[in-house]
Amino acid sequence: MTAISPKATSATPNFCEGIQYFGEGLPEFEKYGRQSAIPSGSTAVNPKDSAAVYQTLLYADALRYLTLQVTASKASGHPGGFASQVEAYASLVMLGYKNIMTEVGHHAPGFYSAMFLDRSLEDMGIFTVQQLRDRFREKHGLLGHLSGFIPGILAPAGPLGQGQHFAMSAALLHRDKLFPFTIGDGGIGEPYPMSSMAHFHTAYPEVTNFLPILVWNGFSQEHHSMVSTKTNAEMIAYWQGNGFEEVILVNAKDFDDQNQPGDYVDSTVFSMQQRMEFTSSVLTGVDKAAKSAMAGKLTVFIIKQLKGAGVHARGAKSHNLYPKDTLDAPHIISALQGRALSAEAWELVRTNAENAGGGRASKTVVTEFELALPELGELGLEEYAVGGDAKVSTTAMGRLVGIVGQKDKNFIVTNADGNEASGIANINQALKINHPVKDDLYNQAPGGKVYEPLSEDACAGLAVGLALMGARTLWCSYESFAINGLPIWQTVTQAMAELRRQTPSTITLFTAGALEQGRNGWTHQRPEIEAYFASMMRNGNIFPLFPLDANSIQVCYDWALKTKNKGIVITASKSPLAIRTTFEQNRQGLEDGAIVLQETPGEKKVVFAVIGDMTLIPVYEAAKLLQQEGIGTRIVSVINPRRLYRSSDVAWDTCSEADGDFLSDGKFAEMFGGDALIGVTGGAPAMLEPIMLRSNSQRDTFAWKRGETTASAGELMAFNGLTAEALVKRGIELVG
């Protein structure tokens, strides 16, 4: 039985300030712990060395101790899931791998503990365990789930189904490094991870340097997991059936000498000899898995151990701490004392953690450095004559996308519903769809730069993951279906707002808007997605753009490519539409937020603030009819509504790449002032909020209501009340 000391001594390392319990006389320490298994100048252990196994075990217990003490210090947070797999995490680090990600936001306190032990958190002023405790789940500290702000941590983690996208993105950009990521029982129950990995492996069979670490612990957040009844053979077959050539499973049950019931057991209650055997098996298994993944085999490592192993509770009860779970609670005290290390052991663990992988994660992992980007130079924008032939906006942008892809070897376009259907077949022609079957008719070939899984989650995931890792990308979608990929897009844009480095903005092109999809009916008419972006505009780094013609979209895309750490949504039609503006007008429109397209005189003035391209058609017709009534109009096209907010409306100053440009009150009055203001959009009226907040005129909005099957865009607009006649009637009413 290890003796417990409640106090530090003068010989205790300074970083240990805040540790409540120290162990004395740790078993086997004199034999295996007197010399670091990763001395200065080394980066990894020999997995077959007994001292390496012992010190990996010490590291695992140190992670358990810190995870529990940090969460219990706030009686809040999630220790159980991370605790069940620490032998795997510790093995990765001891083997020199630090580019580690996770699918599981609930593993955050464990990751913070690891970043503390290797000194990465010193970059944010955390030098002691007490400071680690103080800043856990606090503003400007260590938030409850992983973010882009924490030194040494590669990617954010919150919603399940996202972690593999970050690992695959990093693996694609850095072929010489391994990117393990932990995925839990809950995550494997989602449909997205496995399908996205399968499609990625089909498209990029040579990229296998990402390594799922399945934390198979039998429980989800509040109950048994849906995979808890699978046998080992069934779990192995599941991964093999999805293309994984190498499946390595280490089951704690095989080492249990305490006769624990059930299929899932806790290794921390084994005898010391069996703890060593289990840790050795995990260490050698992880080593084999890492080498397999780096050698070209799609590989998974599975650690099967009871959730909550070594902490305050077991099973789903270990998942979350509640107000009763304080550092004074007997069950927390008992758990901490059970994992307590001596001061010497803490020093040893820190030395190994810091030396592993060549230094602290905050100085070595790939996301701590900006990825070198090739210069794009001039893209060769083609300016069409105002009043000339109608042009398809998306096709005009597609030509530029092809040029970007030819200049930037890492550039990728993703699309689930097909570029040709969105008027951007020229992207496929220039860059080719990445497909194992070469077929010139369909513009597909191995190694193409257009990634087309039939999943918006997979499309958005790879595009935004690559952008977060520092590469240029474009996610294309029908506006109707993009909602399925938005959770990870939102995760990444939020992370970009707090990143400590620059990265290219994540850019999207959403086409085939509701007004173009009359014959397809309401299933293809979902512009409510614009309300999502309207809400996100207040974040500070989200910029929905609404180009009004083929000249406008080129300027918008050119601008987006030059920005950093933003989420930029370009929404445009795939129908041929009139050219109404010059390049210079659109550059000014991006800066001011909107441009005046037309002004007609009259005794009274009705101002139309219009979002979108097709919605301009009934507005121009309404202006003619109002002129016949002696009422003047001003048609204003809203291109960049984020610029139209007041500075105080938006959290722009909290963003790492702050953009505080907003239209002045004077210019706003000049552009939108009149006797009446009518906002018009083919999407959600929430996008008009910046204008309606600032206007003092009599005002109203005309917007999307619901979908229906119609024969034309005009008929669909009429169904939603977006007609010239309705606009005229309301304009006359407003000016009285």
Image (spheres, grey):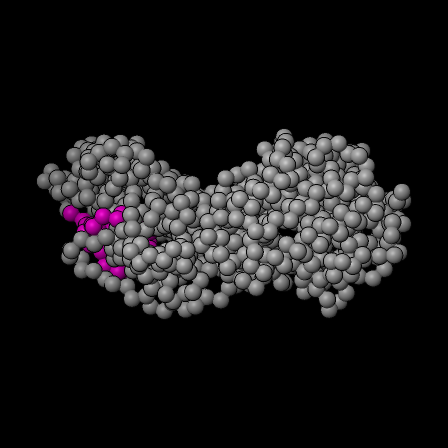
Q: Is residue 627 above or below residue 371?
A: above
Horizontal and vertical percent position of residue 89: 68, 51
- Of residue 477 and residue 18, the one placed in the foreground of this image is 477
Residue 666 visible in the displayed image = no
Question: Which contiguous range is marked in magenta?
Answer: 571-600
Would you identify the image quadrant in which residue 426 lies? bottom left
Q: Quadrant of the C terminus?
A: top left
Give the percent coordinates (x, y) of residue 99: 61, 57
Tell me residue 144's x, y (percent): 61, 43
Please give left or right for residue 160 compared with residue 125 in the image. Answer: left
* Residue 576 lies within the magenta run: yes
Give me the residue at 52% from left, 48% from top: 243
Q: Is residue 619 magenta?
A: no
Please count the marks in the image: 0
Residue visible at 45% across and 47% down in the picture: 458
**Which of 629 and 638 lies nearest the eye of the viewer?**
638
Is 410 positioned to the left or the right of 305 in the image?
left
Q: Is residue 84 left or right of residue 465?
A: right
For residue 32, which quarter of the picture?
bottom right
**In the rendered view of the protein, which quadrant contains the N terminus?**
top right
**Residue closest to the eye, 239 or 717:** 239
Q: Is residue 119 above or below residue 147?
A: below
Does the image show residue 516? yes
Residue at 89% x, 50% y: name it: 25
View extreme (left): residue: 628
Q: Residue at x 78, y 40 (%)?
A: 256
Up/down of 14 relative to 230, above or below:
below
Vertical position of residue 282 compared to residue 399: above or below:
above
